């Protein structure tokens, strides 16, 4: 027995009650037994470590046990139950299709199934990794499934249902096993550490549960590796011993990257303990989960926390762009002699998506005439351009005098610090009412971002720098808002300058 799987074997669920997760499948199987409507062939499909083989054995036990509980659970103490637990029961035949994949193996089954079960009610064949069978073997199996003897039941377990012929699938009752939820993994984990009397801190527990990735087997394999540490293990030790990525560090690197703190992001990644392969794989998992969360809205506290910490709204398209960069990095890592460089290139590429696109620095500015007039009390209207040169209000040199120009300056000044806000402001308009600066934005998610205290503080300081006053910030959503200025991408730098000067009547 593989040393790593000792715990998994020891704590394999022995009846339906002990099995955690897959409730809908258990319910259906129990009801089939209760009503005497058992099928001749089943497919148990799902990723590894989700309980397919365990449930197949429990089902075989329930079909043959002479003293089922009221709840259709096998008794666990009769000779049949005990033989099945020990792997000795003559009417339960387990075949590993990875090593018995040929037509002869299946023919042998066909010859044998003509005989009635020796002891139990049913002869049960569990074919593990069924997708590994050869085409000839599938054909032979199909003939068997077409005319199966009453008392024979096939259970085909597979991690790759797409490799099974449709003709086989259509003859079977199919159950799709879902990956274990973190909640289910944690439940199972708690039961085992209680029984084994392991002392494990909560953060180490979370680390192991999260890295189970929906597989009971993988989770217990990691638990096994740290099980012999008698004293309570620190989080850092667990990260090292298990060779797992440090989540905290990983998230900090990406938060810095997405917030534009590229220097911090890169120096965080150059620490001695960064394992490139893990970092990229874990990052892929992180953004994959973020994508699923954004698209489906399915609850995922892990990525919700991450998104909150980033503090900006990342579009689905940009998450896809990030994933593509990371996928490319996996290939690059295989060839690279400098894995750290590959990781850092990926970080810079992601940073580039957000912070060095050319569409913002190179622009034409067009004032949107007669649209969305800006109402202000003591700030000049944008139409009052002609008087700006004789501005009497004592504004310091370099501060624009006209409202539109001031707005442009706010947008300009926001760019080096917060590319996202700069983008939002470009698509927005505003009114000034007394001491309140009312931002008019086209989308609710702009508002959601802009009303965050951090964003408000940033905007307040920008406005103060340009308008030389303290504002309260308010924000309203108006889908039909016309931005005060329109930015057009223009690759020719000279033309851009002149067009800005034209608009603002700047003397050469
Ligand atoms: Zn029994």
Image (cartoon, rainbow, N blue to C red):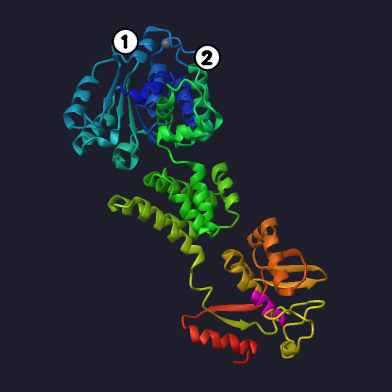
- Total number of numbered discs in the rendering: 2
In the shown orientation, is residue 482 left or right of residue 279? right
Where are the magenta residues, as a range? 401-409
Task: Identify which residue is drawn at 53% across, 54% down.
Answer: 256
The image position of residue 29, as x and y in percent, is 45, 25
Figure quadrant of residue 346:
bottom left
Marks 2 and 1, the one that precedes in the sequence? 2
Q: Is residue 201 above or below residue 82?
A: below
In the shown orientation, is residue 136 left or right of residue 498? left
Q: Is residue 60 visible?
A: yes
Q: Secondary structure at mark 1?
A: loop
For this rendering, which residue is in front, 216 or 346?
346
Figure quadrant of residue 381:
bottom right
In the shown orientation, is residue 466 left or right of residue 213? right
At label 2, counting other C-alpha atoms closer than 10 Å, the crowd grade (few under 14, some 14-19, many 20 or more) is few
Task: Identify which residue is drawn at 74% across, 78% down.
Answer: 374
Question: What distance separates the C-alpha of mark 2 from that of mark 1?
Answer: 23 Å
Task: Identify which residue is drawn at 70% across, 84% down.
Answer: 370
Read off the residue under disc 1.
119
The image position of residue 445, as x and y in percent, is 63, 60
The image position of residue 347, as x and y in percent, is 44, 56
Task: Identify which residue is drawn at 71% across, 88% down.
Answer: 385
At label 1, counting other C-alpha atoms closer than 10 Å, the crowd grade (few under 14, some 14-19, many 20 or more) is few
Q: Is residue 68 above or below residue 396?
A: above
Q: Is residue 316 visible?
A: no
In the shown orientation, is residue 257 left or right of residue 148? right
The question of residue 93 being in magenta is answered with: no
Q: Is residue 166 above or below residue 380?
A: above
For this rendering, which residue is in front, 101 or 185?
185
Helix, strand or loop: magenta stretch = helix
């Amino acid at each position: 027995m593989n040393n790593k799987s000792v715990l998994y074997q020891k704590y394999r669920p022995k009846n339906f009650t002990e099995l955690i997760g897959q409730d809908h499948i258990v319910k259906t199987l129990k009801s089939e037994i209760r009503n005497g409507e058992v099928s001749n062939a089943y497919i148990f499909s799902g990723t590894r470590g989700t309980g397919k083989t365990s449930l197949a054995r429990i089902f075989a036990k329930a079909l043959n046990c002479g003293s089922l509980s009221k709840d259709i659970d096998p008794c666990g103490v009769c000779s049949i139950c005990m033989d099945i637990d020990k792997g000795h029961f003559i009417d339960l035949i387990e075949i590993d299709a990875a090593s018995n994949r040929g037509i002869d193996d299946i023919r042998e089954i066909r010859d044998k199934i003509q005989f009635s079960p020796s002891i139990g009610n049913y002869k049960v064949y569990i074919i593990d990794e069924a997708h590994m069978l050869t085409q000839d073997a599938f054909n032979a199996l199909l003939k068997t499934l077409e005319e199966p003897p009453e008392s024979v039941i096939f259970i085909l377990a597979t991690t790759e249902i797409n490799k099974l012929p449709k003709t086989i699938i259509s003859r079977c009752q199919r159950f799709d096993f879902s990956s274990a939820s973190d909640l289910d993994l944690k439940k199972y984990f708690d039961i085992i550490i209680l029984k084994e009397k392991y002392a494990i801190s909560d953060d180490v527990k979370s680390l192991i549960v999260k890295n189970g990735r929906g597989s009971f087997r993988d989770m217990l394999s990691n638990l096994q590796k740290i099980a012999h540490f008698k004293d309570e293990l620190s989080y850092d030790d667990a990260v090292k011993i298990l060779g797992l990525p440090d989540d905290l560090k990983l998230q900090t690197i990406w938060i810095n990257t997405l917030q534009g703190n590229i220097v911090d992001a890169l120096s965080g990644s150059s620490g001695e303990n960064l394992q490139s392969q893990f970092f990229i794989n874990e990052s892929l998992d992180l953004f994959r989960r973020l994508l699923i969360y954004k698209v489906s809205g399915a609850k995922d506290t892990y990525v919700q926390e991450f998104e909150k910490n980033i503090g900006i709204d990342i579009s689905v398209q940009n998450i896809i762009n990030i994933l593509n960069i990371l996928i490319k990095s996996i290939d690059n890592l295989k060839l690279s002699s400098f894995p750290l460089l590959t990781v850092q290139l990926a970080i810079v590429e992601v940073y580039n998506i957000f912070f060095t696109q050319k569409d913002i620095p190179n622009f034409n500015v067009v004032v949107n005439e007669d649209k969305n007039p800006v109402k202000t009390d003591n700030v000049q209207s944008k139409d009052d351009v002609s008087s700006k040169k004789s501005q009497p209000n004592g504004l310091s040199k370099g501060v624009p005098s006209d409202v539109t120009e001031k707005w442009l300056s706010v947008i300009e000044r926001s760019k080096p610090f917060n590319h996202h806000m700069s983008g939002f402001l470009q698509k927005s308009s505003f009114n000034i009412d007394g001491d309140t600066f009312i931002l008019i934005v086209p989308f609710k998610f702009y508002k959601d971002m802009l009303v965050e205290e951090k964003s408000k503080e940033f905007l307040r300081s920008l406005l103060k720098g340009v308008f030389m006053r303290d504002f309260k910030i308010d924000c309203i959503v108006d889908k039909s808002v016309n931005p005060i200025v329109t930015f057009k991408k223009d690759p020719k730098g000279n033309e851009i300058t002149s067009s800005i000067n034209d608009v603002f009547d700047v003397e050469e």
